[in-house]
Amino acid sequence: MTEPLSILLIGSGGREHALAWAIAKSPLCGKLFIAPGNPGTAQHGENRPELPVSDHAAVVAFCRAENIGLVVVGPEAPLVAGLVDDLTAAGIPAFGPTRAAAQLEGSKGFTKDLCAEHDIPTAAFARFTALEPALAYLRERAAPIVVKADGLAAGKGVTVAESLPEAEAAVRAILDGSEGGALVIEECLFGEEASFFALCDGTRAIPIGTAQDHKRVHDGDRGPNTGGMGAYSPASIVTPEIAAEVMTRIIAPTLKGMAARGTPFAGILYAGLMLTAEGPKLIEYNTRFGDPEAQVLMPRLTGDLVPALLAAARGDLSGVAIGFDDARAALAVVMAAQGYPGPVTRGSEIRGTESAGDDTVVVFHAGTRREGARLLADGGRVLAVTALGASVREAQERAYAAVARIDWPEGFFRSDIGSREVAREAASGD
């Protein structure tokens, strides 16, 4: 049997709490460090808030000092900054794509060009770095139309404009008076969105689950986009036939195209899909586990996560199997601070998180901090209350019952996470 590894997990959000929760269960996990971590990850390992993750030399030095056998990079920013490149150059196994491969998330224009080159189904688009040509292009098109900042925007850099003035305002916000600004304008696709996840080693891909996120801040999918107000898994709308089509027409050509460019992709390929009348189309890629999607994928995991992450980091997924419990659904309700996704007030006390969890409910921390024995809000999205059930309806009922046990008057949440799927279950008699 392989000796247990010391593992370093990079990140501080709800995704990282979910990953720490899953990694700590592995017999291969010896000591788990999380940098910087949060009060939730501290339940499963040792937080290292003093380690500056943007200082790659410091991370490498820490890994050598602690004999780290695997680094798992949670958020997108360190991936785009090339942390995996520097760890790999130092001989330290790291899970996640290189800087060049992370362009699939770091640049929407890069991904669109790859789609065009390899006939990957996606929305028609045009790229711009100058204001006037972008505005002229808009005026030739009809609303609704989509405007996307080219770079990282924490899930909030997309405007689905219902009118030309709204689209023009979005373009100006990205390009007007800025240096180096870039954007993509694309047709508005119609259908239902879903998230599809594949574990990759550079040449192979293993599908590892589906989910549906709720991006809008208010019930009924109203209000501005957020990083995600809740999610559930699996997404029944992604049938086995659709999943096979996604693997064949979207994931496989992406891996082939990236390898042909000399930038093979290893890590998690998270495809945001629109299921249109013409079939699934790629909206965008993320190059890491989603947040809050990780919070509904990890509780459904039936196998050991660590060997799969290590195999991907070593570039060989042959023989790796990673499974999820198809008999159970998971649903997460995000509790956010008032004002999110705009400015929020930090420091309000949260009570009851310990009593909210049980053998079917996990309260994942995101924007929290400890002040003595008190748990305080310290961000926009603060908690993800995740429940398991035999159906999405059962998971939904358990999640909202747990939310009701948390005493946090300064927080808010959507009351309709998973409702569309619950309606589908009712219609099918499940």
Image (cartoon, rainbow, N blue to C red):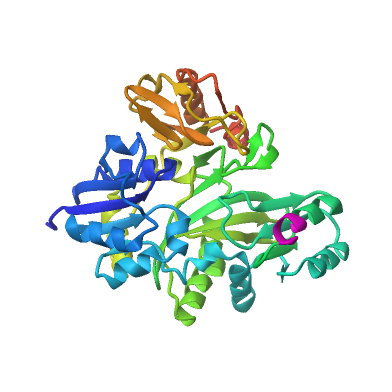
Query: What is the span of residues highlighted in magenta in the rendered image?
Result: 171-177
Is residue 320 positioned above or below 32 on the image?
below
Which quadrant of the structure image shows residue 182? bottom right
Q: Residue at x 43, y 69 (%)?
A: 265
In the rendered structure, the answer to whether residue 373 lies left or right of residue 395 reads: left
Q: Nearer the viewer, residue 216 or 130?
A: 130
In the rendered structure, the answer to whether residue 243 lies left or right of residue 21 reads: right
Q: Nearer the viewer, residue 21 or 153?
A: 153
> Is residue 188 visible in this depiction of the protein?
no
Which quadrant of the structure image shows residue 44? top left
Q: Nearer the viewer, residue 1 or 342?
A: 342
Is residue 98 positioned above or below 27 on the image?
below
> Is residue 394 visible in this depiction of the protein?
yes
In the rendered structure, the answer to whether residue 207 lies left or right of residue 231 reads: left
Q: Position of residue 384 (x, y in %)?
A: 46, 34
Which quadrant of the structure image shows residue 313? bottom left
Q: Position of residue 27 (x, y in %)?
A: 18, 47
Taking the magenta stretch, the answer to whether it contains residue 339 is no
- Chief secondary structure of the magenta portion: helix
User: Could you tell me how many numbered marks the image carries?
Assistant: 0
Q: Position of residue 68 (x, y in %)?
A: 21, 57
Q: Residue at x 33, y 55 (%)?
A: 72
**In the rendered image, which quarter contains the N terminus?**
bottom left
Q: Residue at x 81, y 49 (%)?
A: 162
In the rendered structure, the answer to whether residue 233 lies left or right of residue 193 reads: left
Q: Position of residue 392 (x, y in %)?
A: 51, 34
